[in-house]
Image: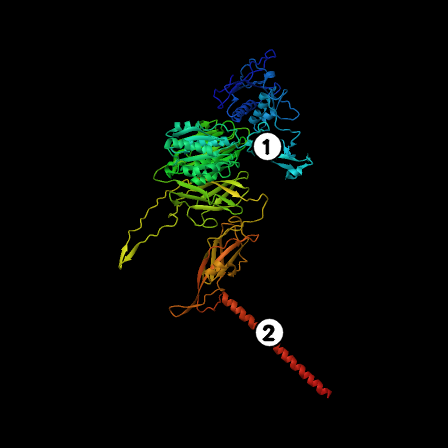
Amino acid sequence: MTHGDSAGPVCSLKFVTLLVVLGPELLFLGAGVQLQENGYNGLLVAINPQVSEDQKLIPNIKEMITEASYYLFNATKRRVFFRNIKILIPATWKANNYSKVKQESYEKANVIVTDWYGAHGDDPYTLQYRGCGKEGKYIHFTLDFLLNDDLTAVYGSRGRVFVHEWAHLRWGVFDEYNSEKPFYVNGQNQIKVTRCSSDITGIFLCERGPCPQENCIISKILQEGCMFIYNSTQNATASIMFMQSLSSADRLLQLQQAAEFYLMQIVEIHTFVGIATFNSKGTIRAQLHQINNDDDRKLLVSYLPTTVSAEAETSICSGLKKGFEMVEKLNGKAFGSVMILVTSGDDEHVTNCFLTVLSSGSTIHTIALGSSAVKNLEELSHLTGGLKFFVPDKSNSNSMLDAFSRISSGTGNIFQQHIQLESIGEYVKRHHQLKNTVTVDHSVGNDTTFLVTWQTSGPPEIVLFDPNGRKYYTDDFTTNLAFRTARLWIPGTAKPGLWTYTLNNTHHSPQALKVTVTSGASRSAMPPATVEAFVERDSTHFPHPVTIYAIVRKGFYPILNATVTATIESETADPVTLKLFDDGAGADVIKNDGIYSRYFFSFAVNGRYSLKVHVNHSPSISALAHSIPGSHAMYVPGYITNGNIQMNAPRKSVGRREEEQKWGFSRISSGGSFLVLGVPADPHPDVFPPCKIIDLEAVKSEEEVTLSWTAPGEDFDQGQANSYEIRVSKSLQNIQDDFNNAILVNTSKLNPQQAGTKEIFTFSSELFTNGLEHQPDGETQKSLRIYVAIRAVDRNSLKSAVSNVAQASLLIPPNSAPVFARDDFMLKGVLTAMGFIGIICLIIVVTHCVLNRKTRADKKENETKLL
């Protein structure tokens, strides 16, 4: 029986499985493997007759070569792929009704599968017996390699391994590594690791862990126990013949996936869109074309780049020039146009077109791919008022999709824009799942789209449940196998509630799976909840922190009590998550204004950082604030003119209707990128003090003062401070200008709590007074106004800035004993000390006189006795 699918290039392969191995009289193979219209036909895989029947083996072989076809197609810049294969089955296998063989035989197979192990165990290998560029004999796989998924951690995915061996077999290419000589001496007399390309990175490993190169090499000899370990994810563009197991972020694939989604879903209807590419020069791939329907969108998708240029030179100015030409051809000028500039290359001449860009009237959004992108790329955004983004070279990062999802036409019409509800990317182990829920609330639901992307071979197994339990499967999604995307568009208005999705990684090796969900406003009269994320400034220098902000609102009303989490990614370090607050403490200046904020200072490396904010809100009927925050113009109710009262019209009262949120909501937004410089390479001492306390309040209570504030941290607003320094003065100016000399309050029993905790501390007011004041009733009552400030101290004695100044007015009953202020205390102390000194002097004088008198009396008595 024949099993197969007819398809064009890349989309799928034909598979023909054969019934039985006949006698040796039928050994003629025919034409063998032929390359026809970019596809290899007639590849023969033979299973050794000694191999026991295993129902997993044939599916695994199919999956391996299917994955290899995709990988080979992309690696050769869409030049070749595997169109079909044949699998020769041992005669002893009886589980299925296989087709009969023709001229195929085991001896003529291109790939053989056996139980026999070579000197290197399960190592796949190709028998090569001729020189470079000459075809080999066959590729050999062990049964364990094809069935044991644990070996993919050693050799890499089977599809990649197959392409590595195919290059040996078909093109006579040899390995670009040498296990016997892993190091060599270059022309500069330096020790180098044998690898290709030299851009592949890693570290030296000694017996006790990571070590510098000089510890491993002595007199140009590699010390026993030393080795070079490679980073699992690389930015290098070549490694198939070196180490096929190395994973790459595949920048082109990420760009294709994000650009396709942008064109199919994000960019607004009736927008004109064109596509240009550039290396050393710019090329127009698609002239400006207006989007009026899905066919227009699909047409533009077909013009997206499919290969990466091999040229080392990058000319950003050439690309921008082509973009300007497209717009000027349509409108005469580039005024009002928007350009999305994506690049991973360096360009030392980019400043040459800054003046042209500035005068163009165009807005340029920049997306930097990886750490090698031109250093001053963001200046183009700064000059034109565009957004700037950074996409780390990480396969599980969704930053590229987030960036394209954030970019809109700039009209401000929220009812025509798509709002991002979900964005997640994770490495999923083989046969494991990525499962999560996303909330579609009442304010959105129109034009809702679920996008799934993957890395390897075909799509994962997708199951999506709507709130009513309806199921959507992989076949319900529109799949683009070339870009590895699957998209489901929900017609009409999506049902509000929890949507649950499950992605099952059916591939035999781990891969990054990602989900992005967008939706539009459901009604024009009700603005949806939105989030706008950004940072305080474009760059910072260690140790100064970056302040992260997220504005969460519905229309112009702030949304309170939301859970807001920022995710910050750098090029090499793990992502950092940080919860943002709207509590009026730390980095947050105003409480309950819907602007959530936090300090970020966990800088791992120098370079660009990417920001994304995730907002969740639980079901609540009191989500919105009752007023719009900000500094308002004063409303004047009326005036007195010539002795007459003239009242103005009453202030217009706008009723705020708030619907019950049965399911809450979720939102995602990219916050762009920022730059960090000056981060030390080695571990650095503590340089981060506690943050300034900005919400100190003082309340009088009889003869006590109660203070309250939000606890800062050991480092800014994170951790736990070591102690507090509270000082009091009767002069506002003195405590502001000379905090260190104000009266110190005893805080020995005050232990700081975790950052964000409400602190309360009470102390007695008996140390302070303002003197006596005459009251209207003739009574004399003591009144006291004091000013209090505080600062936190960490364990390394780093001090925060002095807090805001709080004040309290105390009224002390007239019959109470007088209490002295600080100056009175000092005077009393001085007078008391002088009094004590005078008494001591008097005692000394009196004692001296008594002793002298006694001495004279004794002397006189002795003289009398002598006479």
50 relative to 689 in the view: left or right: right
The tag earlier along the polypeptide, 1 or 2, is: 1
249 relative to 49 in the view: left or right: left
**Mark 1: which secondary structure?**
loop
Determine which of the numbered discs, if any, sits on residue 840 in the image: 2
What residue lies at 64% left-to-right and 39% top-to-bottom? Answer: 212
> Which residue of the protein is positioned furthest toward the bottom in this rendering?
867
Determine which of the numbered discs, if any, sits on residue 198 in the image: 1
Front of the two marks 1 and 2: 1
Q: Along the line of sight, which residue is nearer the eye, 384 or 550?
A: 384
Q: Amino acid at mark 1?
A: Ser
Query: Residue 415 falls in which quadrant of the image?
Result: top left
Q: Amino acid at mark 2?
A: Ile
Q: Along the line of sight, which residue is nearer the eye, 461 or 257?
A: 257
Indicate the position of residue 557 as horizontal and vertical percent values. Answer: 38, 45
Q: Residues within 10 Å of mark 1 (few under 14, many from 20)?
A: few
Q: Quadrant of the C terminus?
A: bottom right
State whether residue 499 appears in this view.
Answer: no
Indicate the position of residue 400 as horizontal and vertical percent values. Answer: 48, 35
Tell me how far mark 1 sits from mark 2, CA to CA. Answer: 88 Å
Q: Is residue 739 above or below residue 307?
A: below
Determine which of the numbered discs, if any, sits on residue 182 in the image: none
Indicate the position of residue 160 as horizontal and vertical percent values. Answer: 56, 27
Query: Residue 855 falls in which quadrant of the image?
Result: bottom right
Q: Are marks 1 and 2 in contact (CB under 8 Å)?
A: no
State whether residue 802 appears in this view.
Answer: yes
Q: Is residue 650 above or below residue 112?
A: below
Q: Residues within 10 Å of mark 2 (few under 14, many from 20)?
A: few
Q: How many marks?
A: 2
Indicate the position of residue 834 as horizontal and vertical percent values. Answer: 56, 72
**Mark 2: which secondary structure?**
helix
> Which residue of the protein is positioned furthest toward the top in this rendering?
25
